[in-house]
Every structure is written in C-alpha cells, then in structure tokens.
C-alpha cells in the first residue's frame, strides 16, 4: 500500500525545475494576457456584440470551436495517460502522468473560462447547475456539467503535487487513499463529454455539411481526441525537455504515439466507411471549400501513419515531433471543420472571428503556457534531472497504490 | 385658433385677402401662422409674415421642368387645402410653367425670354426634374436646346434658384444606377449650392414656406450642407416619428399585415428609412393630403426619398442605418446583424498566429533533428567500438 512497496515504478521522482520565472518569453506571454483582459473588459461591459463577430446565425464562434472544443480535446492527454498508466497498469508511463495532468488541468480551465466569456448572460451561469433551472434533456447541459465536474476532478488529481510542495503530509496521505476513485472518475468523464462535443453537431442537423454530419460523430470525436491528447503530451514533453534541458523520454513518447497511430487508423476507417455507407463520399470530390478542408484534415490524420509507421522511425525525435504536430492539428482542423467551416446556417449569414476574439483566444493560450511554465518551475511536475535527488521522491500521484 | 390672440398691428390688417386669395380672413391668418411656425420663427413674426403675404410685390417665377414626372407640380396643385395652390399662385407671378401655361411653342419660349428680360436679377428660378449630361445632354431638349443650356441661361440672372423635388435636388429617380442619361442635380450643373427642396414629391408647404421666407425677409432661409432649408430638413424622420415609442420598446412589424403591423408598431424591420432620412414628414405629413396621411402613418416604411443614395437606390426593404440613437445594449437589438466576413485585420491576426506557430514548430523540429544526428553519430561510434 505504501509508496515504497511499489519501487519499480517509483524511480522517476519529480522535482521542481526552479530557475527564474520572468524572462523575455514569459513577459511577452504576460502582454498577450493583458490584451486579453482588456478585450474581455469590453466584452463584459458592453456585451458580446461589441467584441465578437458572433451572430444569431453563428452563435458559436472561435471561443467555442477553439477554446472549448479543441482546447479540451488537446487536454485529453490527461485521461488517456491516466488510463494507460493506472488502468492498463503500465507503470513505465509514470514520469509523464504529472505533465499530462498539468496540461489537461489548464486545458480544461481554459475551456471552462471561455465558456464563461461566451455565455451572453454570464450572471445566470449558475442556473446550469441548479436543479430547478437545469435543462436535463440538453446535450449542452451534459457537456457543461461533465466539463465542470472533470475540471474539478483534474484539480483533485493534480493536488498531490501541490501538497508535496507544501509539505502537507497528512492530507496527502488521506488523499492518496481516495485518489483511485477520482482517477477512475477522471477517465470516465472525458469519454462522456468528448463524445458529447460530437453530439452537439448532430443536434445542428442539416446545417452541418453531410461530409461532417453523421450519427457517428460522437465516436469520431472520441477517437480523434485520444490521438490529439496523446500528441499534445508528446508535443509538450518534447518542447519542455528542450526548454528546461531535461532528458527526453524518447521511447516512452514513441510508445504513446504508436497508441495514437491506432486511433488515427481507426478514425480514418470509421470516417470513410461511414461516408461511403451514407453515400456522402461524392461530396468530397466537388470543388468546394468544405471538400478542400476535408481533404486537408485527412492528410493530417494520415501523415503520422507515414511519418512514424515503422518502429525505427519512432526513435527519431524530429519525426516523432512532426507526427505529433500533425496528429494534433488533424483533430484541430476536424473540429474547426465541423463547428465552423462545414456549418452553414443559411444565405446571408457570415462568421469570421474578429480581432478581439482572436486576441482572447491567443491570450488564453498564453495564460495556459505561462501557468504551465510557472507550475513546472515551482512544483514537482517533471521527472528530476539526471542523478539529482528529487525533492519528494516517494509520494507520487497515486491511485497507483490502489489500482496497481 | 392662434389667429384670435394675434395682436392687430397695422401691417397685419388683412383687409384685401378675401377677394384676392378667395379665402376667409381667419383662414388666411391661420395659414400665415402655420407658415411662421414651419419656419421656426416666434409668434411675434406672424404679423410680418401676414403683411408680406399681402403687400410684397409678386416675384416673377420661371419654372423649368426636365427629367421629371410632374409629381412636384401635381402635389402643389392637388393639395388638400384648396387654398394652398391659390395662395402659391397668388403670391407669385408664374411667368413660365409648361404644365400650367396656356402658351405653347415659340410663344412659350418668348414668355420665358420676356420674363427674364423684364425682371433681370429679380426673378426666382424653380427647377423640377433632373438634368441629363451624357451625350451632351441630348436626352432632354426644349425648343431645340438642351436642358443644360436652358438652365444655365435662365439661372444666370436669377435672384434665387430653387431645386424642387428629389430629381432637381440630388438626381432623384432618373439618376438611379446605372443612370443611362447621366441625370444630374441642379447643383451639379450650376456648380454652386442652390436651395433644394427634396422629396418625391416634396411637401408643398416646404416650398411655400421657403418662398414666403424670401418674401418676408428678402433672403432665403438657413440651409444645411446639402442646400436644404433647415426648418424642414434639420431632423431625422425617426426623431419625430409617431411610431418611435415602438422602436424604443423593441416592438416591430415583421411582415405586412402581421399582428405588429396591424397594431401600428415600428416599421424599421420592414425597411423604413426614417432613421437615416432628414425630412419633416412626421410633423407636417407628406403630401398635405389629410390627417395621418404620410407613408409611415399609413403603414408603409419610409423609402428615404429626400436622401441621395437612399431613395430609389437602397432596396425598399433593406434595413436603414441608425444614424443617431441606438437602443441600449440591455434591449434586444432592433435587427439581428447577419455577421461580417473576414476582415483584413482578422486575417492578419490569424496569419500572424499561424506564422508564429509554424515558426516555433520549425525551430523545434530542426533542433530535434540536430539531436537525432548526434544520436546517430554516437550510435555509429558505439558500433565502431564494438563491432558485431
């Protein structure tokens, strides 16, 4: 039960990276966040119309398509890695659990924040969670409740890291005993709302181009988000190993990517057989913008299979990184495709994100990056470098104690 | 009503009005009061106006008609008050008017010439209709001479030049895209500002009031930038509209004959151009045709006939731009905007974000490539050391 009894997967002690937080890069992130705050001040004082290009025909703009739908899918690494590590019981993935959870937590915080920006009457947001007002038949209700709950679960999952840093050993001990429940819950919830994000498009019916509109959407969203989440973990692992001069867990990330490859293949198989079954495939060969977008996505989905299809190529850092970029972008474009490009609400309606909307999205991304940098520098997230003694080696995130 | 309390100054003893204008003295005073009010003058000026109406020398008026439908003249003559046209015709000496004069052919031209010669520098020139300019103006000729010629010749010695109706004021319907004849306004032809009374047709009172102002004070009323008398065109229709309360409350007719339309709600969503059209229709109504009779009053959206670029140019049911007030943000917007497409700024922002992302990605990739090369070199070395 105690951490020491599971020594084999314990040798990766985590430690804060330390170092100065403020430099040119983080200061630029600060400026981007400041711009976002200024735009948001306008948005909250003068309404959505003052800042965004959203309208009755396009009530979901960039903030929903990117910050919520894409943002949460990129954060899917949290639950996938937790699933692989704790439920499939592969202890070797332990060193990347914390970075994955950290990225997932801020990804979901970003999603939750942008929902708050996006809701017109934000002061009535609490109605969603109030049984008297809740609209239990709505897909959006399911998504909102699920994302809200999962964001809290992620915080609980990540809290041992903070408790370690603070040196609060007693609460940590209690939490470690309960954590198995949250890890299990934390794997279940994202599968629910990631597929519901696809169901949202089903609800829009014929307004979504038949190339995208299918009852398979929930499954397509789920399979693609797993690939995106894993790719994001690989991306972040690679970039942080470069940025903080930490050893790159090359083999581990390569294995993760091979899991992602399976999901890319499943996705493409599902997508094309569904299109053929529905007879919508001819639409892909019409010279339309949507069709062009559709093919671009599919190339991105297929590219990782070519780049790192062989085990040898998975040993190359550059290929691994490019494949991860492609895998993540494929899902990003797929979601933009479904929510904005293939969505046509009728003649006369237009949407393209305004500068203000883009500024908020960029600011939120900057916020996420800055928060992750600060967390990595101050908290025991990344595996300790080389022979360096980890600050707290023994107590890691740990439903493992139970689930193992 | 107003006449009863009017002080009797010597000049406003309207003794001869009954035989001259064929109306009762009381009615005459009422009209004088109405004109004074329309000009925006104080009550005390009523006496001066009434006096001028009786005593001022009748100015000679030359009324030219070009690309027009005679609607302006018709609306003057068919006004609800049988007295109005009488008043107009009695106040001025209409020496040349193709619709009304008995003379024809050379006789008519001679009338114009002699009026010009007799009243050189004193006559008023009124122009009705647009003036074609393409092909040297051959599209409109009178007595073998083009409209451009005629108007320039007649305007040269006029004391005042008035453009009546939208066509003469800003080109009107004949100038609607694609404007095959190059129809132009009087102002454009003469190259100088003239008094414009736009409207299709304009309210006869606005014309009459302008003339009376000239008679009373010897000068024209104050004009706005487009040459329109401020007393008539100083405010938006929207500002004094009888349906304005419905606009402010967000109650709109959506279709002709729907519930809102039957209840007299705001016509903005049917395309009413009141919010961007300057005219005094809500106050003095449209064609002087009786109570409540102006387009908005009878349930048709204003088409913006007094405004260049709006009347005959903007589709009748296209939404007007809100020039002055917009409802507070807490209210439902009067019309749902259908959204904007891509703008230069947003495209640039997207391109910048994409550029930065691709740049960082490429840099990371090349960095990783170097590491890969180092790995490969190390591996090769190891293989050399331990062959097999």
Image (tube, coloured by chain):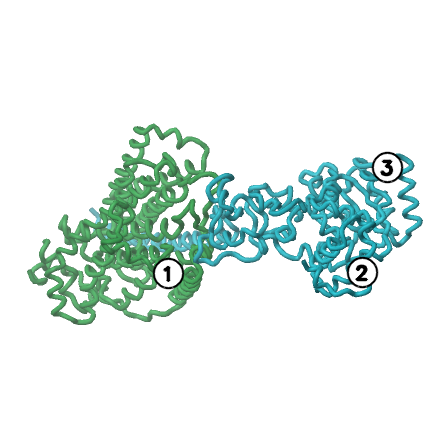
Q: Which chain is cyan?
A: B
Distance between the Cα atoms at labels 2 and 3?
Answer: 35 Å
Of tags 1 and 2, the one toward the viewer is: 2
Residue at 13%, 56% in the rendered image: A180
Label 1 and label 2 in one chain: no
Q: The green chain is which one?
A: A
Name the quadrant containing residue A340: top left
Q: Name the residue under label 2.
A: B13
Say if residue A330 shows up in the picture. yes
Q: Which of marks 2 and 3 is nearer the N terminus?
A: 2
Chain letter of mark 2 equals B
Residue at 22%, 58% in the rendered image: A154
Q: Is mark 3 on a helix, strand or loop?
A: loop
Say the numbered circle drawn on residue B376.
none
Question: Alpha-carbon neighbours of circle 2 within 10 Å: few (<14), some, or many (≥20)?
Answer: some
Front residue (pair B374, A20): A20
Front residue (pair B364, A361): A361
Q: Name the residue under label 1.
A: A366
Side (left or right) of B62 relative to A353: right
Front residue (pair B343, B276): B276
Distance between the Cα atoms at labels 1 and 2?
Answer: 84 Å
Chain letter of mark 1 equals A
Distance between the Cα atoms at labels 3 and 1?
Answer: 84 Å
Locate residue A58, reporting x and y percent: 41, 46
Q: Mark 3 points at which residue?
A: B102
Side (left or right) of A384 relative to B132: left
Question: Alpha-carbon neighbours of circle 3 within 10 Å: few (<14), some, or many (≥20)?
Answer: few
Locate residue A253, reporting x and y percent: 25, 51
Q: Work out whether B205 lies above or below A287.
A: below
Locate residue B196, reporting x and y percent: 74, 51
């Amino acid at each position: 039960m105690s951490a020491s009894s599971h020594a084999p997967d314990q040798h990766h002690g985590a430690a804060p990276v330390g170092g100065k937080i403020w430099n040119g890069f983080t200061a630029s992130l600060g400026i981007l966040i400041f711009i976002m705050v200024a735009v948001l001040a306008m948005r909250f004082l003068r309404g959505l119309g003052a800042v965004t290009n959203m309208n009755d025909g396009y009530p979901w703009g960039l903030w929903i398509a990117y910050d919520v739908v894409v943002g949460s899918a990129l954060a899917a690494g949290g639950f996938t890695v937790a699933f692989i590590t704790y439920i499939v019981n592969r202890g070797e993935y332990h060193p990347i659990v914390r970075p994955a959870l950290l990225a997932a937590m801020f990804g979901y915080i970003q999603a939750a924040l942008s929902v708050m920006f996006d809701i017109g009457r934000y002061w009535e947001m609490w109605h969603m969670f109030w049984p008297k007002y809740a609209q239990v038949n709505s897909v959006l209700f399911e998504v909102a409740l699920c994302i809200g709950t999962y964001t809290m679960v992620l915080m609980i999952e990540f809290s041992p890291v903070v408790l370690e840093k603070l040196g609060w050993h007693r609460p940590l001990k209690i939490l470690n005993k309960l954590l198995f429940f949250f890890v299990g819950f934390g794997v279940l919830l994202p599968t629910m709302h990631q597929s519901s994000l696809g169901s949202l498009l089903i609800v829009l019916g014929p307004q979504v181009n038949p190339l995208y509109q299918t009852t398979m959407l929930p499954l397509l969203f789920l399979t693609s988000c797993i690939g995106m989440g894993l790719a994001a973990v690989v991306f972040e692992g690679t970039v942080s190993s470069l940025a903080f001069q930490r050893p790159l867990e090359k083999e581990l990330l390569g294995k993760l990517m091979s899991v992602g490859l399976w999901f890319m293949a499943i996705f493409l198989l599902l997508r094309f057989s569904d299109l053929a079954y529905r007879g919508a495939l001819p639409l892909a060969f019409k010279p339309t913008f949507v069709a062009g977008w559709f093919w671009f996505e599919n190339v991105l989905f297929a590219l990782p299979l070519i780049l790192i299809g062989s085990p040898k190529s998975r040993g190359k850092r550059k290929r691994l990184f490019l494949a991860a970029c492609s895998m993540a972008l494929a899902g990003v474009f797929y979601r933009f495709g479904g929510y904005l490009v293939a969505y046509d609400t009728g003649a006369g309606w237009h949407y393209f994100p305004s500068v203000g909307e883009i500024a908020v999205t960029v600011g939120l991304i900057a916020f996420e990056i800055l928060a992750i940098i600060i967390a990595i520098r101050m908290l025991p997230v990344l595996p300790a470098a080389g022979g360096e003694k980890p600050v707290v080696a023994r107590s890691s995130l740990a439903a493992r104690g139970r689930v193992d | 009503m107003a006449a009863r309390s009017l002080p009797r100054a010597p000049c406003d003893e309207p003794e001869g009005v009954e035989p001259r204008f064929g109306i009762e003295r009381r009615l005459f005073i009422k009209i004088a009061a109405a004109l004074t009010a329309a000009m925006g003058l104080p009550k005390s000026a009523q006496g001066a106006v009434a006096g001028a109406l009786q005593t001022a020398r009748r100015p000679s008026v030359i009324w030219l008609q070009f690309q027009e439908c005679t609607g302006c003249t018709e609306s003057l003559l068919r006004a609800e008050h049988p007295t109005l046209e009488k008043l107009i015709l009695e106040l001025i000496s209409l020496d040349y008017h193709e619709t009304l004069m008995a003379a024809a052919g050379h006789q008519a031209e001679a009338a114009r010439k002699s009026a010009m010669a007799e009243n050189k520098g004193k006559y008023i020139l009124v122009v009705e209709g647009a003036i074609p300019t393409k092909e040297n103006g051959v599209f409109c000729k009178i007595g073998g001479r083009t409209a451009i010629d005629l108007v320039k010749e007649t305007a040269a010695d006029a004391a005042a030049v008035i453009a009546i109706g939208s066509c003469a004021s800003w080109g009107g319907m004949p100038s609607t895209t694609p404007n095959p004849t190059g129809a132009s306004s009087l102002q454009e032809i003469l190259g100088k500002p003239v008094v414009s009374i736009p409207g299709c047709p304009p309210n006869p009172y606005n014309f009459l009031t302008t003339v009376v102002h000239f008679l009373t004070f010897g000068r024209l009323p104050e004009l706005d930038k487009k040459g329109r008398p401020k007393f008539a065109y100083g405010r938006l229709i929207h500002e004094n509209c009888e349906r304005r309360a419905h606009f402010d409350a967000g109650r709109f007719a959506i279709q002709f004959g729907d519930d809102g339309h039957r209840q007299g709600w705001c016509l903005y969503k049917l395309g009413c151009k009141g919010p961007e059209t300057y005219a005094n229709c809500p106050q003095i109504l449209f064609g002087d045709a009786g109570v409540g009779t102006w387009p908005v009053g009878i349930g048709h959206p204003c088409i913006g006939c007094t405004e260049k670029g709006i009347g005959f140019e903007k589709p009748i049911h296209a939404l007007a731009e809100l020039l002055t007030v917009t409802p507070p943000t807490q209210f439902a917007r009067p019309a749902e905007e259908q959204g904007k497409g891509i703008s230069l700024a947003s495209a640039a922002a997207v391109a910048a974000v994409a550029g930065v992302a691709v740049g960082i990605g490429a840099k990371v990739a090349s960095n990783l490539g170097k590491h890969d090369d180092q790995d490969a070199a190390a591996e090769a070395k190891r293989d050399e050391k331990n062959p097999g």
